[in-house]
Image (cartoon, rainbow, N blue to C red):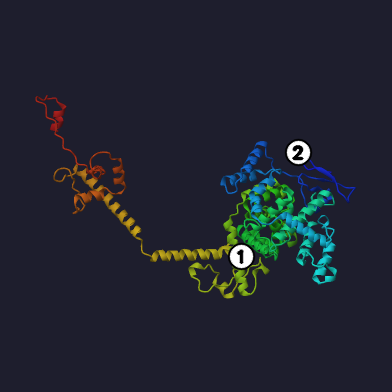
Amino acid sequence: MRKSSMGSSGSGRSRTFSIKGRPSEDLVFDEFGFALVKRKDQKRQHRCHNYRYPQLDASRVKDLCELLSYWNGSSFICRSQIERFVRMGIPSSLRGRVWKCLLNTENMRESSVFNYQKCLDQIRGSLVELGVSEYSIISAIATLNDTENDLGYNRPACLPPNPAYSTADVTIFRQIALDLQRSFPTHRSLMGESPEAIEGQAKLFRVLIAYAKYNPEIGYSQGMSYIAAVLLMNLSEEEAFWALVVLLENPKYLTALFDLSGKKIQHQAMVFHQFLKHRQPQLSKHIGDVGVSSIHFVTPWFLTLFTSLPCWDSVLAIWDLFMLHGLSAVFRTGLTLIQLLESRLLSLTDEAAVLPLLLRVPVDVCQHNVLLPALWSTQVQDWEIKCMNSLVLEENDEGHHQGKTEWSTPLSPQPRPAKAKEPEACVDGPAPEAKKSGKKDSSATGPKNIFSRLVQVAQCLLLDKGHRSGRSKPSPARRRSSKASRTSSINQSQIRAKRRSLAQQGGGSLAEGGTTPTLVSEGSVKDSRPKAAVFRRMCSGPVGRVARRRSSSSQSPRIKSIGVLRPRTTQKPPEPPQNPSPCDPAQNLRKL
């Protein structure tokens, strides 16, 4: 029997168990508890045991333990640090603690009035009256069927007086018992009749029926057994129950997926279909042309959180990311798988080949060193999901208004109802021939189909805003700013004109008293205002402000801020020598 190859010696050892009921067969389990089946059964089980996840060194593990010891869920530093460890890989021994911190299960348990142990006592009382044991729930399916039929046909003679159970309770008991047989049939905690398997089945049954009692509006639906089983593989029984409560009650996680009618998962499948048309229009069109609806593969992916993938180390890494980011990580993983399978899907032209490829993703795509780098490089924003959700809601409203829904043929292009009296600038409609015939142009498929209405709304808003701004009067602050800019430009032009005139004349003419310059230059108009006002105007603006800040003299900063207007002091020329020499160079220069 082949054993799995692991990175660490302690966790990579396989275990051999003798299953009760199969005394002649010894099964070997890998480090995650999955049985290593024979080679001829590997294809049927679709499970890979060659794990390639990275191993953290001792220093990293110590840092992670310290982070969990002072964990604060509302701290940005803690969440950024835990995201760094999620990217590197969470050790299996610490995964349960990380999930509890991210889900904040202790706070949920302390703030709730629900008592898990009291609920289990009530469940056991109902099972005793039914004659069924929690440790033999699978073998009691026939008994539950008979009891449900008696309740349905209203046969009081076959029932005890005042029973502690109802028809809904018996129905839930039977549904959970049936799903226990399908939930991870090759895992050591659920397969066979060994003591570990019997105890694991009883824990899973108690957690699921307790949640059905906790929230009767959701109750139990298919897919919950897989989620609860994964939680039980990493947490204790009560911790797994409260983790399941957080996942199904918090809008960040799975509230938008589970309900009794199944309409929520159908809606999310349509949202993913629109999201795929937005991100991969060519591939989405090809899948639709083949005849595969998104609900056929999105439903098992989302309801089981990708636990059907063959590589369990990749599944746990996806769950780590899901615990951190919520429902957006589910869309992110689905998009990554589609992108990795793009070349294979485009090469297939038959529905019988495309759908099995999506439901049973190949091992080489799901391996940790292939799937996880692609997953971290794929980014999905929350606004994208909200946008696609709005589109689906709008389409459903239009379909309901027309008396039919688009989900009956979700992948075939449907003619959009024309909106009455829309502005021409806001409508990106088809050609006139298409309008007359009432059909859409086939070239309109792709991203334009998805965002056409959003673009129309955005254009309408922008045009409306432009018209309002064109009709509205400028505000007083805007008028002041424009006036200041004109004043500043006039001041600068006057300064430049004065500088040129002074350079041509060799200085400026001074007013009376020789202290105030006259602001008259060639080609300029004399200002009739007082000189103080003129200087005040000329010293405004950025040049004057900088000059005033740098000035430390006792003179007036308004006059000193403009260097070209400083009054020039007349100096007395030096007296010639008494007896100049005939070869005096200074005398010769003066003569010249």
Q: Which residue is mark 2?
A: 10
- 317 is higher (above) or lower (below) than 132: above
Find the residue positioned furthest to the right: 24
List x then y, in percent, for residue 310. 75, 51
Which of the labelled discs sits on residue 585, or is there none?
Answer: none
User: For the point 74% across and 53% down, which residue is it?
Assistant: 229
- 487 is higher (above) or lower (below) than 424: above
Label 2: how many Cα within 10 Å (few below 14, some 14–19, many 20+): few
List x then y, in percent, for residue 2. 82, 43
Please name the amino acid that badge 2 sits on. Answer: Gly
Label 1: how many Cα within 10 Å (few below 14, some 14–19, many 20+): many
List x then y, in percent, for residue 494. 25, 50
Please name the amino acid that badge 1 sits on. Answer: Val
- 66 is higher (above) or lower (below) than 357: above
Q: CA distance from mark 1 to mark 2?
A: 50 Å
Circle 1 — which element? helix
Q: Nearer the viewer, residue 350 or 315?
A: 315
- The quadrant in which residue 419 appears is bottom right
Q: Which residue is mark 1?
A: 392
